[in-house]
C-alpha cells in the first residue's frame, strides 16, 4: 500500500478487460475503488464485491445514476466501446453520458485508442476522438491514455498450432511493425494517471512492444518451443469496413506512435510480447 490509500477512484468497465486491469492496479496500490456497473448481480460484478470493491449501479439511459455514482470520488476512469455491432454512435453516446456525469469529478482518465487524434478514418477510433473532443469542449479535467493493439487480441485472432507448427496469420504485410500492449499494463498506466494527476500531460499513447508478423510468430514459437511462421493475409479477408480500415491504417507509416520508454516510466514492469506470453502462460490452440 502506498500513500494513495486515501484516494477514492471510480472505475467504469471494471467487469471488462481494461477496467478490470485498472481495478487490479489500483487495488495493488491500496486505493479505494468504486466500480460503476450496470448489473451488480452479474458474476463478474459479484466477484469484484467479494474482493471488497464497492459497487455502484448505473444505467446509461438514466444519466442521473452516473452523476450520483461519481459523487465524492477523487478520480474517474472510463473507456468506451462501440459494442458487438460496432456502432460508433453508441460509443459516442456512452462516452458523452459518462463525460457529462464526470463533469464535477476533479480528475478523469479516459482510455481512448492510439492515433485517435490523427484523423485515422477508422470508425471506432473516430468515435473515441469524438469522446475526447467532447471532454475537452465540456472542460472536464481529463487526460487521455491511448492504448495500441492489445496483446490479448492474439488469443482470438490469427495464431494457431497446426501440424506441430505455430502459424500466425494477420491481414498485415510481413514487413510492417505493429505496436502492441498488454491489458495489464493499460491498467498500471491508467492507475498511475488516476493517482498522480500530473503523471500524464494531456495524453499519452502507450505500448509495450513493436513487432512485425514474423517477429510475433517467432516470439510465440520460442515460447512454445515449436517452429513458427507468418502468413500475411489480404485485407479482403476482413468482412467489416471498420476492421478493414483499421488494418489498412496499421500498414500506413506511421500508424501507432507510442513511446515505449515513456510508457515504461508510467508502467514500470511493462511487458513486451515474450514477457506477456510468460506472464499469461498463453499458447495458441492446436488445430
Ligand atoms: N482490442 C484492442 O486492440 C484495442 C486497442 C485499443 C482500444 N481498444 C478499445 O477498447 C474498448 C474495449 O475495452 P475492453 O476490452 O476493456 O472492453 P470489454 O472487456 O468488452 O469490457 C467492456 C466493459 O464495459 C462495460 N459496459 C459496456 N456497456 C455498458 C453499459 N451500457 N453500462 C455499463 N457498463 C457497460 C461492460 O460491462 P458488462 O460486464 O456489464 O458487460 C464491461 O465492463 C473498445 O472500444 C476498443 O475499441 C481495443
Image (spheres, grey):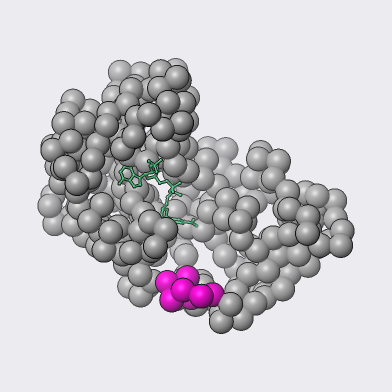
Residue nearest the viewer, comparing 272 with 48: 48
In the shown orientation, is residue 135 left or right of residue 260?
left
The magenta span reads 238-244
Image side of residue 113 versus residue 150, left or right:
left
Residue at image coords 42%, 37%: 15
Q: Is residue 163 above or below residue 142?
A: below
Residue at image point 18% right, 36% down: 65
Residue nearest the viewer, comparing 281 with 145: 281
The reply to whether residue 107 is visible in this rendering is no
Q: How many marks?
A: 0
User: Which of the image's four quarters has the N terminus?
Assistant: top left
- Between residue 280 and residue 188, name the one nearer to us: 280
Residue 116 placement: quadrant: bottom left
Front residue of 57 and 242: 57
Q: Residue at x 27, y 32 (%)?
A: 57
Q: Is residue 52 magenta?
A: no
Residue 192 vertical placement versus 148 (above, below): above
Q: Is residue 82 something one can see in this rendering? A: yes
In the orientation shown, which residue stands out farthest toward the front?
41
Q: Residue 283's x, y, as percent? A: 73, 48
Q: Is residue 128 above or below residue 100?
A: below
Residue 18 placement, left or right of 224:
left
Image quarter where the C terminus lies is: bottom right
Residue 240 part of the magenta segment: yes
Percent x, y of residue 64: 13, 38
Q: Position of residue 44 (x, y in %)?
A: 45, 33
Q: In the drawing, does residue 186 fall left or right of residue 235?
A: left
Tell me where residue 93 appears, x and y as whole percent. 22, 56
Amino acid at each position: 500500500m502506498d500513500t494513495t490509500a486515501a484516494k477514492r477512484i471510480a472505475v467504469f468497465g471494471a467487469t471488462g478487460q481494461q477496467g478490470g486491469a485498472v481495478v487490479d492496479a489500483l487495488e495493488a496500490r491500496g486505493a479505494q475503488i468504486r466500480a460503476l456497473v450496470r448489473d451488480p448481480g452479474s458474476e463478474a460484478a459479484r466477484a469484484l464485491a467479494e474482493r471488497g470493491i464497492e459497487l455502484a449501479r448505473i444505467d446509461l439511459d438514466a444519466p442521473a445514476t452516473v452523476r450520483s455514482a461519481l459523487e465524492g470520488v477523487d478520480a474517474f476512469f472510463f473507456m468506451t466501446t462501440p459494442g458487438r455491432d460496432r456502432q460508433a454512435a453508441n460509443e459516442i453516446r456512452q462516452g458523452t453520458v459518462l463525460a457529462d456525469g464526470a463533469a464535477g469529478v476533479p480528475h478523469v482518465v479516459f482510455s481512448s485508442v492510439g492515433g485517435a487524434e490523427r484523423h485515422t478514418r477508422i470508425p471506432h477510433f473516430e468515435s473515441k476522438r469524438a469522446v475526447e473532443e467532447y471532454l475537452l469542449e465540456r472542460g472536464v479535467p481529463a487526460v487521455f491514455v491511448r492504448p495500441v493493439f492489445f496483446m490479448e487480441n492474439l488469443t482470438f485472432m490469427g495464431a494457431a498450432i497446426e501440424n506441430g507448427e505455430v502459424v500466425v496469420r494477420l491481414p498485415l504485410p510481413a514487413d510492417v511493425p505493429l505496436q502492441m500492449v498488454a491489458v495489464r499494463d493499460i491498467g498500471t498506466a491508467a492507475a498511475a494517471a488516476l493517482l498522480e494527476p500530473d503523471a500524464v500531460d494531456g495524453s499519452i499513447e502507450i505500448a509495450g512492444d513493436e513487432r512485425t508478423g514474423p517477429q510475433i510468430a517467432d516470439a510465440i514459437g520460442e515460447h512454445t518451443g515449436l517452429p513458427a511462421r507468418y502468413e500475411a493475409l489480404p485485407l479482403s479477408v476482413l468482412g467489416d469496413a471498420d476492421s478493414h480500415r483499421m488494418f489498412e491504417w496499421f500498414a500506413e507509416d506511421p500508424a501507432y506512435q507510442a513511446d515505449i520508454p515513456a510508457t515504461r516510466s508510467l508502467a514500470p514492469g511493462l511487458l513486451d510480447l515474450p514477457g506477456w506470453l510468460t506472464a499469461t502462460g498463453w499458447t495458441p490452440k492446436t488445430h
